[in-house]
Amino acid sequence: GIIENINRIEQELTVNYEGRSVKYDFGDLDAISLAYVLSIHKSQGSEFPCVIIPLHTQHYLMLQRNLLYTAVTRGKQLVVVVGTRKALGMAIRQQDTRKRFTALRRRLREMAGGDSGDSRHHLTRQ
């Protein structure tokens, strides 16, 4: 959830859980815990004491070996994988071999002054 409001006069905290607001008295705040969530992409280059990785076949487009490797290597003391064995197997087997269509070649041509008829424009793929 997301904290919507802190009312110091009424001593209440309002938390929004996916569209549903819940009020807590300050005395009941031990019933909730502060938590942070990061995507695998945003966690690149960071380290954390504990990492929890949800893996499920419903997220099959994200089940890729390189993403799993990145997620697992973020945890320095504990890594917990929550999900199905099938999803884990899919992630291990799936290498990121998809091509990315960025239109970079076309954009560079446009920046260089347009298309002169030569489709190569001295741009090579590496």
Image: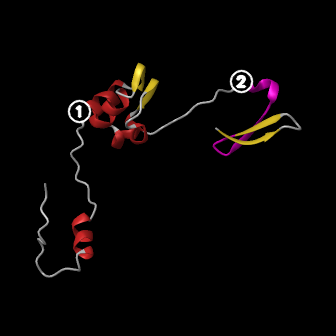
Q: Residue furthest right?
A: 9
Task: Check if residue 70 falls in the magenta segment.
Answer: no
In space, the residues marked 2 and 1 are separated at their CA atoms by 40 Å
Foreground label between 2 and 1: 2
As helix, strand or loop, the secondary structure at mark 2 comes to helix
**In this rendering, is residue 113 above or below 38?**
below
**Left or right: where does residue 124 sit relative to residue 7?**
left
**Left or right: where does residue 1 sit relative to residue 44?**
right
* Kind of residue sitting beneath label 1: Arg
**Left or right: where does residue 49 sit relative to residue 61?**
right
**In this rendering, is residue 114 above or below 54?**
below
Q: Which residue is mark 1?
A: 93
Quadrant in the rendering for residue 103: bottom left
* Kind of residue sitting beneath label 2: Ala
Which label's residue is closer to the chain start, 2 or 1? 2
In the rendered structure, which segment of residues is drawn in magenta?
16-30
Measuring 24% from the left and 69% from the top, which residue is drawn there? 108
How many neighbours does mark 1 have within 10 angstroms: few (below 14), some (14-19), or many (20 or more)? few
Quadrant in the rendering for residue 26: top right
Residue toward you, 4 or 49: 49
Measuring 48% from the left and 37% from the top, which residue is drawn there? 38
Measuring 23% from the left and 32% from the top, which residue is drawn there? 93
**In this rendering, is residue 77 above or below 18?**
above
Number of disc labels: 2
Residue toward you, 12 or 55: 12
**Left or right: where does residue 27 sit relative to residue 100?**
right
